[in-house]
Amino acid sequence: MKLKEIAHSRTGDKGDMVNISVIAFDEKDYPIIQKKVTVEKVKLFLGETIQGEIIRYEVATLGAINFVMHKALRGGVTRSLRLDKHGKTLSSILLEMPINTND
């Protein structure tokens, strides 16, 4: 399954940083997200898009995980030559990440 089948996201960006919150639709799916959506897997899935550190914060009361990604926007909204200079596109990409629930 894809992450978007069990979660939605919200984003924010400031300068060259973006934060992406992955939020379970149903609280029963939060443990799957906790286990399967790690910093390492997010970094691997987003590839060279994220040039810096990724920090993960768990917000269990909301069934959410927040990822703060450094050096993610090629300088930020006013400096980047990227077509979409904001972080919202990255959340859509992240929601396409495959989640293997069999292991």
Image (cartoon, rainbow, N blue to C red):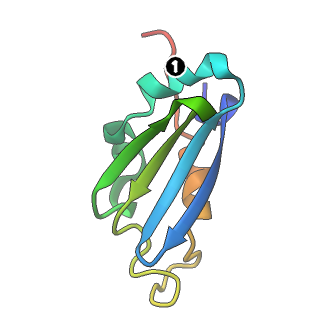
Q: In this view, does 50 lie above or below 1?
A: below
The residue under the point 52% across, 69% down is 13
The N terminus lies in which quarter of the figure?
top right
Name the residue furthest front.
61
Q: Can residue 76 be seen in this view?
A: yes
- In the rendered image, residue 88, in percent from the top left (x then y), is placed at 61, 62
- In the rendered image, residue 102, in percent from the top left (x then y), is placed at 48, 9
The residue under the point 31% across, 39% down is 40
Q: In this view, does 46 lie above or below 18?
A: above
- In the rendered image, residue 2, in percent from the top left (x then y), is placed at 60, 31
Q: Can residue 63 be seen in this view?
A: no
- Element class at badge 1: helix
Q: Is residue 38 above or below residue 101?
A: below
The C terminus lies in which quarter of the figure?
top left
Categorize mark 1 by other alpha carbons within 10 Å: few (<14), some (14-19), many (20+): some
Corner quadrant of residue 3 = top right
Corner quadrant of residue 87 = bottom right
The residue under the point 57% across, 79% down is 83
Q: Nearer the viewer, residue 73 or 34?
A: 34
**Left or right, residue 22 beside residue 52:** right
Q: Name the residue under label 1.
A: 31
- In the rendered image, residue 85, in percent from the top left (x then y), is placed at 55, 77
Instruction: Specify the amino acid type for callout 1.
Output: Pro
Q: Nearer the viewer, residue 10 or 84?
A: 10
